[in-house]
Image (cartoon, rainbow, N blue to C red):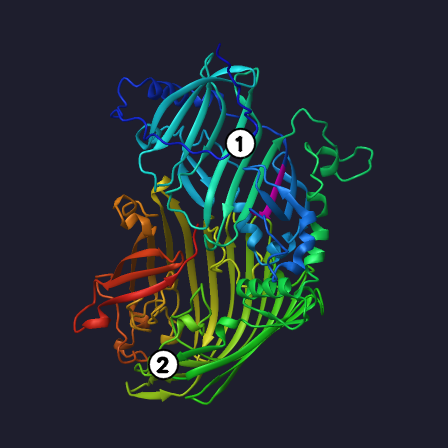
């Protein structure tokens, strides 16, 4: 007698799929498994759920310390945490003991967030921008798409119309019953296990060849960071029109910093509540929140007391010390109170305390900002800096009035504020980096190197910024600057007779406006802003239009227009290309300081959208177009090299180019009175653009990138490190 056991399709355990037992040569021709999946792919548009259908969805995300089987009595360090026993729960993924530390519930109606409930350390994640990364990691998966966007990466879908059959091997595994329907269980594995693909099963109905359910996971060999396990499970119901409707979708993941340390378990679930009673805005109020009334599955007893758990943990000094370390590393600021939530003033950024450059020598800086504990609308932000070589004290002080009340710091989204700034500091023309502050330790240049073109700038400015939820923002400013050349920079004014006189300082008045639009860009609350290295989700395109009107040297009134576009192009699982196009024009007659000089970066650190081998002020122009492109291949080639693929390295190719020109009215070589002569080493573009290329490897220790960069044009008389060299970057990716 044979006894058949029907699987429990809603209790997903760990999925491990291997094909090693199949010794026969795999063939796509005359393969019934390939024929079956090809038929499903051919008809997937007729069955895929409608994306524009109004629906009500409930999402829940929990974060927990995984495998929390701690023996408190035998560990003196953990003995004071023995109260945690009463909070230990069981993971739904693999039934291991877990300690849940964060819970977030979101109710969405017609695609819009209607209500949110958070418990545990979720407020900390939100304040430092980490919550935005989590939201981006656990995106809504559509297996019918050609690529699946998950964990900030792109995976080839097993139902991809273009790549599935060539990217995966398919096998008919069994015939089972799922939700009362007979289904073919189709197993699949990626051809290359290190690439961004899945292993798992598709459950396809025998009658109609319709997808009933899928359960998939990433291979253990995959080239991903900080993720040790990732599994997805989703089931569908058929609608009268033949389309599918998702019932519930689960995503399970484990994260780690070091594999031998305790891991973080995450479970994200989405329930489709269509057919459930929906609360109307004009309905008679009832007890409890909307989430409490519509929650499809009650919270477990341990999930309802997460806030109590965090409260007890906060009473343990060792826990507070660990939390402070994480907060300092993530925000770059040190609180001046024992509890960060009560700190009136934070010291930082800590990454700018010490730096080096040839003019200042060792630069020492200390600064900070007030918090919402003093005022939810008024803030102060600033620093003092001192150079051991030039012996000058520099400073910056900004008074901020936020029209929107802030929870903690003034740079929380959405921005709507006035800024009044006074500052005196040293700067390099053409070296305004986006990613890091100019005196960040990583942007240092050794004082023993030859001096470069620099200048002291004393400024007073007023700025207004307004940002809307659709990610459109306006930024308007007025600024007065008093400029004094320094280092190797000298300004010489051309007189009526063609002779030049030294300019020790000059004034520059400016007023301008910038429009910025980044459709789909998630809000990010870290104090370092959208360009923070901890902001992992940068897929949204960014467009900037900036127009500046100025009067310089009390002689020239000029106007300048800049247009900047940034876009990430994904090539399915074969990586992505980050691009930035910057074009602009100076419309009027203007001296050298008002002209455009490309952003250069002579430090060892790789800074995005800069020219690594171009000297500061090497080129000037009044009309220009610059393109920066970096292709992150995600290990597409190195994953296929035995032994080397164990290192999880990833390839990087980069290109930077710029072409510009200087019109005769602004060319000092024609002897125009009042213009500044070109400094030594400054030149004009010929008919050839300036070009740089780079090739490198990233993901060294999961965060370090090393490139060899080479200059291709304007190379006459250059040799050694002026032609090419090694550069090091820092980049966190999943």
Q: Position of residue 308 (x, y in %)?
A: 73, 52
The residue that mark 1 highlights is: 12
Q: Position of residue 121 (x, y in %)?
A: 64, 54
Q: CA distance from mark 1 to mark 2?
A: 76 Å
Check if residue 62 falls in the magenta segment.
yes
- Give the answer, above or below, for where 37 lies relative to 342: above
Q: Quadrant of residue 319?
A: bottom right
Q: Within 10 Å of the Cα at label 1, are there few (<14), some (14-19), or many (20+) other Cα atoms? A: some
Asked whether residue 628 is in view, the answer is no
- Give the answer, above or below, for where 568 lies relative to 489: above
The residue that mark 2 highlights is: 674
The residue closer to the viewer here, 601 or 99, is 99
Q: Residue at x 71, y 68 (%)?
A: 375
Q: Residue at x 36, y 21 (%)?
A: 38
The boundaries of the magenta stretch are 59-66
Which numbered disc, 1 or 2, marks the residue closer to the eye? 1
Secondary-structure class at tag 2: loop
Secondary-structure class at tag 1: loop
Q: Is residue 29 left or right of residue 119?
A: left
- Give the answer, above or below, for where 217 lies relative to 206: below
**Which residue lies most toward the top here?**
1
Of pointers 1 and 2, the one earlier in the residue sequence: 1
- Give the answer, above or below, for where 478 lies relative to 507: above
């Amino acid at each position: 007698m044979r006894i058949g056991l029907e699987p429990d399709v809603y209790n997903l355990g760990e999925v491990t799929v291997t094909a090693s037992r199949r010794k026969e040569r795999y063939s796509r021709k005359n393969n019934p498994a390939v024929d079956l999946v090809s038929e499903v792919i051919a008809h997937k548009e007729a069955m895929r759920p409608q994306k524009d259908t109004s629906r009500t969805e409930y999402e829940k995300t929990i974060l927990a310390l995984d495998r929390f089987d701690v023996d408190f009595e035998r560990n003196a360090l953990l003995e004071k945490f023995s109260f945690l026993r009463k909070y230990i729960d069981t993971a739904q993924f693999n039934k291991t003991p877990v300690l849940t530390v964060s819970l977030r519930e979101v109710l969405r109606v017609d695609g819009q967030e209607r209500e949110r409930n958070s418990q545990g350390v979720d407020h900390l994640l939100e304040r430092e921008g980490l919550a935005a990364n989590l939201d981006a990691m656990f995106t809504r998966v559509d297996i019918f798409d050609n690529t699946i966007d998950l964990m900030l990466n792109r995976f080839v879908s097993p139902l991809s119309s273009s790549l599935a059959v060539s990217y995966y091997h398919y096998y008919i595994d069994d015939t089972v019953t799922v939700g009362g329907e007979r289904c073919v269980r189709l197993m699949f594995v990626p051809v290359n296990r290190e690439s961004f693909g899945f292993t798992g099963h598709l459950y396809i109905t025998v009658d109609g060849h319709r997808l009933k359910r899928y359960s998939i996971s990433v291979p253990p060999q995959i080239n991903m960071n900080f993720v040790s396990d990732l599994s997805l499970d989703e089931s569908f119901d058929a609608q009268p029109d033949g389309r599918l409707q998702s019932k519930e979708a689960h995503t399970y993941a484990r994260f780690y910093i070091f594999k031998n340390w305790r891991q973080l378990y995450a479970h994200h679930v989405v329930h489709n509540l269509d057919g459930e009673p929906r609360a109307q805005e004009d309905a008679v109020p009832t007890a409890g929140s909307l989430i409490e009334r519509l929650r499809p599955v009650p919270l477990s007893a341990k999930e309802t007391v997460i806030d109590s758990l965090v409260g007890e943990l906060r009473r343990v000094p060792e826990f507070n010390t660990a939390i402070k370390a994480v907060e300092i590393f993530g925000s770059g600021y040190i609180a001046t109170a024992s509890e960060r939530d009560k700190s009136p003033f934070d010291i930082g950024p800590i990454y700018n305390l010490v730096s080096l450059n040839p003019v200042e020598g060792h630069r020492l800086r200390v600064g900070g900002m007030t918090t919402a504990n003093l005022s939810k609308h008024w803030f102060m932000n600033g620093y003092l800096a001192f150079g051991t070589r030039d012996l000058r004290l520099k400073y910056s002080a900004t008074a901020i009035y936020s029209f929107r009340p802030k929870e903690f710091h003034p740079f929380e989204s959405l921005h709507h504020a006035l800024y009044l700034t006074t500052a005196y500091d040293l700067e390099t023309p053409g070296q305004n980096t986006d990613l890091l502050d100019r005196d960040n330790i990583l942007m240092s240049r050794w004082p023993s190197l030859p001096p470069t073109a620099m200048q002291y700038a004393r400024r007073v400015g007023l700025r207004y910024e307004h940002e809307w939820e659709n990610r459109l923002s306006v930024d308007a400013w007025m600024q007065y600057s008093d400029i004094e050349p320094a280092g190797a920079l000298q300004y010489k004014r051309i007189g009526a007779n063609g002779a030049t006189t030294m300019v020790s300082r000059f004034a520059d008045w400016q007023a301008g406006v910038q429009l910025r639009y980044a459709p789909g860009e998630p809000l990010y609350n870290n104090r370092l802003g959208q360009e923070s290295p901890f902001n992992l989700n940068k897929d949204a395109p960014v467009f900037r239009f900036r127009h500046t009107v100025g009067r310089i040297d009390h002689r020239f009134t000029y106007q300048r227009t800049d247009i900047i576009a940034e876009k990430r192009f994904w090539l399915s699982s074969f990586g992505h290309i980050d691009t930035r196009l910057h074009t602009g024009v100076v419309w009027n007659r203007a001296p050298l300081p008002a002209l455009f000089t490309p952003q250069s970066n002579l430090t060892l650190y790789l800074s995005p959208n800069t020219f690594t081998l171009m000297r500061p002020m090497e080129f000037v122009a009044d009309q220009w177009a610059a393109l920066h492109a970096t292709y992150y291949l995600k290990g597409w080639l190195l994953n296929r090299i035995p032994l080397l693929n164990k290192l999880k390295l990833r390839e990087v190719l980069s290109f930077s180019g710029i072409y510009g020109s200087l019109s005769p009215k602004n060319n000092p070589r024609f002897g125009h009175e009042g213009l500044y002569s070109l400094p030594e080493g400054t030149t004009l573009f010929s008919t050839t653009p300036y070009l740089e290329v780079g090739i490198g490897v990233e993901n060294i220790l999961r965060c370090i990138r090393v490139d060899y960069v080479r200059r291709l044009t304007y190379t006459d008389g250059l040799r050694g490190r002026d032609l090419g060299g090694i550069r090091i970057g820092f980049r966190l990716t999943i």
